[in-house]
Image (cartoon, rainbow, N blue to C red):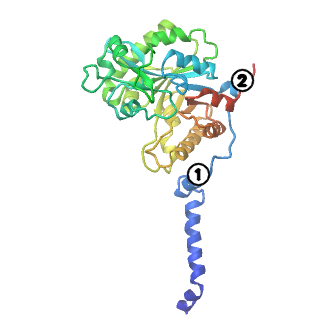
Amino acid sequence: MTRTFFARYRGYVIALLAALVVAAVLLPSPSTSLGAYVYELLRRCPDESDAIAPSQFYVIGHRGAAGHAVENTIPSMDSALRLGANAIEIDLCMTRDSAIVLWHDWMPDDPIATARQQGTETDVLAKPLVPDDEDPMHRPVHELTLAELRSAYGYALKDSTRRLDVSIPTLEEFLAWSTGKEPLRAVYLDIKVPDELASMGPAVIARIERILAASRPAYEVVYLVAFEQVYDAVEPMLPEGNISFDREPPGGLILDPAEYGSTPTALARGNRHASTIIPITSTFGPWTTARRIARTDVLASSGRVRFVTGTMNDPEKLACLVGLGVAGIFTDFPERLRRIVGTPAR
C-alpha cells in the first residue's frame, strides 16, 4: 500500500520536499542562517530608512578626492572640500628621519601595493610610481629619508608611466593647509604601519601626537588602524578613545555579520569610533556581507559610537548605506555622496 501511495503521489512528495528545502534555505530566520544570507543576497537593499541628519553625517573624502585628483596630495584635499566633503581620510607613513608623510604603501612589495602600482585600483585617478626592484631606493618607507622618498617615488595617471608634477606632503604641510577650513569637521588618520612592524607603532603615534599638539587643529582627529597587532600596540596611547580598529571581513562565506563588526570592539575598548572596510573579492558576496555587517554595527552603536564605512563610490550602494544609518562613508567622489545626504541647513 505504501508503495502504491508513493507511486501515485511521487510527484507531489518530491515537490513538497523541494519546497521544504527551498524554504529552509530562503526564509530569513534565524538571522545567521544560510537562508538569511541568501535572502539578503537576492534583495537589493533593506527597507530601513534610518539616515542621520545631514548636519551630523560625515562625507569623508578618501585620500582627499582620489577620483578627481592625485591621492593624498594637497590638490586632492582642496577638491574634496570643494565637492562637498566635510571630513577627510589620509594615509600616513613615517620615514627614516621621522617625517610623517601622506603616502599609502609602507611596503612597496606588499601585494596591495604592487597591484596599485599596476593601476588596478578602480575609480582613483592616479597610481603610485616606485623604483624598480633592483633600484637601491626600492625599500620600505621607514628605510628612506623624506628627501629620498620624494625624489624616487611619485604618481602617474593609471594609463601612463609619465611622472606627474605633484609633491608627497608631510603631515605638517597638511595641517597648515587645513587651518581655517571651516567645512572640515574631522580628519581620519589611516596609520599604515604593517603588522610585521607593529613595534614601530608607538613611535609613529608619539611623533604624530607631537605634531598635532603643535598645530592644535580645530577639527576632530580619528586614528584608523587596520592591523590588529598595531592596534593593540597603540590603542593604550590614546586615552580619549579617538581610534578605530578599521576591520576588514575575512575571505569566504560569512553567515554571522555580528561576528565581524567593529562596533563591539570599540565599545569594549572605550573608543568613540568604529569603522569597517568593504571587501572587494576575497569575501563571498562582498557587498551583501558588507551591508549586513554595517547594519549590525549601526544597531550596536546605539549613539555611543560613531560608525563609518567605506570606501564606496557606487551611488545606489551609497544611498543604501546612508539609509541604514551609518554616520559617515569614505568615498573617492564626495559630490556623489553629498547629493544623497543633502546639504545641512544653515
Residue for badge 2: 344
Q: Looking at the image, can residue 305 be seen?
A: no
**At numbered mark 2, what does the secondary structure look like: helix, strand or loop?**
loop
Q: Are marks 1 and 2 in contact (CB under 8 Å)?
A: no
Q: Quadrant of residue 167?
A: top left
Three-letter residue code for mark 2:
Pro
| Disc 2 packing (10 Å; few <14; some 14–19; many ≥20) | few
Residue for badge 1: 40
Q: In the image, is 21 to the left or to the right of 168? A: right
**At numbered mark 1, what does the secondary structure look like: helix, strand or loop?**
helix
| Disc 1 packing (10 Å; few <14; some 14–19; many ≥20) | some
The residue positioned farthest toward the top in the image shown: 214
Q: CA distance from mark 1 to mark 2?
A: 32 Å
Q: Residue at x 40, y 23 (%)?
A: 234
| Residue 340: image location, x then y, percent | 68, 33
Q: Residue at x 58, y 79 (%)?
A: 13
Q: In the image, is 43 to the left or to the right of 70? A: right
Position of the C terminus, as image quadrant, is: top right
Q: Earlier in the sequence, mark 1 or mark 2?
A: 1
User: In front here: 259 or 53?
Assistant: 53
Three-letter residue code for mark 1:
Glu
Q: Quadrant of residue 329?
A: top right
| Residue 117: image location, x then y, percent | 39, 30
User: In front here: 332 or 299?
Assistant: 332
Q: Residue at x 57, y 66 (%)?
A: 22
